[in-house]
Amino acid sequence: MIITEQKKLEQILDYLKNAKSVFIVGCGRCATSCETGGEKQVEEMAKKLSAKGKKIPGSVVVEAPCDDRLVSRELKAESGKLREADALLVMSCGAGVQTVADMIEKPVFPALESLFLGRTKRLGKFYEECIMCGDCILDETEGICPVARCSKHLLNGPCGGSHNGKCEVDQKYDCAWYLIFERLKARGKTEQLKKFRKPKDFSKVIRPRKMEYR
Amino acid sequence: MTLKQAIKSNKFIVTAEMAPPKGVDIEKLLESAEILRGCVDAINVTDNQRAVMRLSSLSFCAKLAEKGHDPILQMTCRDKNALALQSDILGAYVLGIRNILALSGDYPNRGDQRGVKPVFDLDSVQLVDLIKKMDSGTDLAGNKLAGKPNFTIGAVVNPGSDPLEPQLIKLHKKIDAGAEFIQTQVVYDVEGFKKFLKEAKVPPKIKILVGIFPLRSYKMATFVNEQIPGVSVPDKILKRIKNAKDPVEEGLNISVDIIDELKPLCAGVHLMTLNNLQEIPEIIKRSKLA
């Protein structure tokens, strides 16, 4: 899931300073799960903007605002209310904001910061464990990714700042290589750490990436 | 004697550390390095140490080499991708630099340019491997070089890191990749270091230089003890520095005591004195290293 957080209201109001009337678009998937852009947050945002004098002609929570087909359908259905809007505020990740912006000739603004691809441990606890490098080595590291979970993306073991299982960058992080080591040790496979891993091949991830298999 | 010769000759090796200035006034610092002439085998020059921006290690090393010193270019993976690292490796060689110390590098969040992009295209093992590869005449992609460099390659280890085993596995990867000398993180815990040496099982041809950093105050001692991962200052030393009338002097005495005890066990020392270079010949004299 894409983890997002809401921008500060002052920032959003600054984006909207020239708009008297704002249509809000929410996200039925990731931003709903993150509690940043679901039904409830869209409703709260409408209230906050109203309190600041904005007219809210309407809002919609698109099941997946990153999907052209769904956005196109919902915007068509809301065309009457959209006509009254000076601007749109999209409460989704950047993919959703861009999808909406491509489909309407009105200013479209982001309400959220897109943070990372996250694993959910429980509601409100999200962790970055994959950075989608396009070159997975989880087979070698016993299911713990050093590319995502080591701050320095080291491939050949911990740096000298790893101590008592913690990362030198910030004690709130576990050292990924410590976790890998402990798991390998428990399974009698620390030999695996001795393998020299070559530098990552960044030619595999020339950005922007796309997938067109049909 | 150069570092390369010192390694070959099996003498006790002494290296010292310098940090380039934050700015372009290098003359005074360069002049202060004269005190090291003849008493150390080589001089490390730090590479934006602790992610604090300074004059490049490469430039300062070149200036030292010009004056006939034998510099060790500290090269981190933090600031440059493999393209830039490779051209710097070649550039260092033509500027007379013959030694490189490969490091991962401190993360920028602790430095004075916190918003910069951390690169880490390579890690330290890969950097050692890359320098070795260039020494053998090819670049990272396997293209042939027009004239090849010939470096003495070093790497680092933190002997106080817990657990030690993953650090030792990585140390051996660095040695297998081509590191000939190892400079350690600073050591105060002599017993811990002895345990490290015993467990590390490093072949004698690989030179372990123990990191020595004279404490200058009780405040510094507690900072080192609490803030530097894997460095512990034993209570005995904390007490010595706390009760000392002249903590700087006591810091030197402590360093000398550590060297005395570890001298028979390792191949050399690496002295880090925060550019208080006059302390280096003093430590060498008191430890009878010369």
Image (cartoon, grey):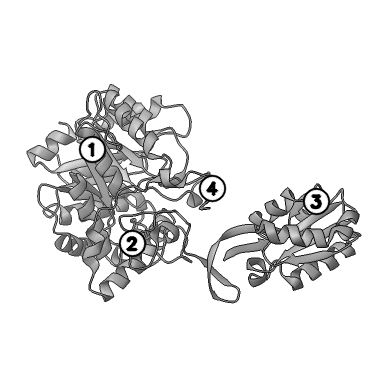
- Examine the rendered structure and indicate whether residue A112 appears above or below residue B36: below
- In the image, B111 versus A98, the foreground residue is A98
Q: Nearer the viewer, mark 4 or mark 1?
A: 1
Q: Is residue B282 visible?
A: no
Please give the residue where the numbered disc 2 appears in the rendered image: B230
Res A64 quadrant in image:
bottom right
Which chain letter goes with mark 3? A
What residue is drawn where x is 19% and y is 34%?
B136
Q: Position of residue A187 (x, y in %)?
A: 26, 75
**Pointers 3 and 1 in contact (C-beta within 8 Å):** no
Q: Position of residue B148 (x, y in %)?
A: 22, 27
**Which amino acid, mark 3?**
Asp
**Which amino acid, mark 4?**
Arg
Q: Secondary structure at mark 2?
A: loop
Please give the residue where the numbered disc 3 appears in the rendered image: A14
- Look at the image and tell me in which quarter the C terminus of chain B lies: top left
From the viewer's perspective, tell me whether residue B275 is left or right of residue B142: right
Q: Is residue A170 visible?
A: yes
Looking at marks 4 and 2 on the same chain, the residue that comes earlier in the sequence is marked by 4
C-alpha distance separating marks 1 and 2: 32 Å
Q: Nearer the viewer, mark 4 or mark 3?
A: 3
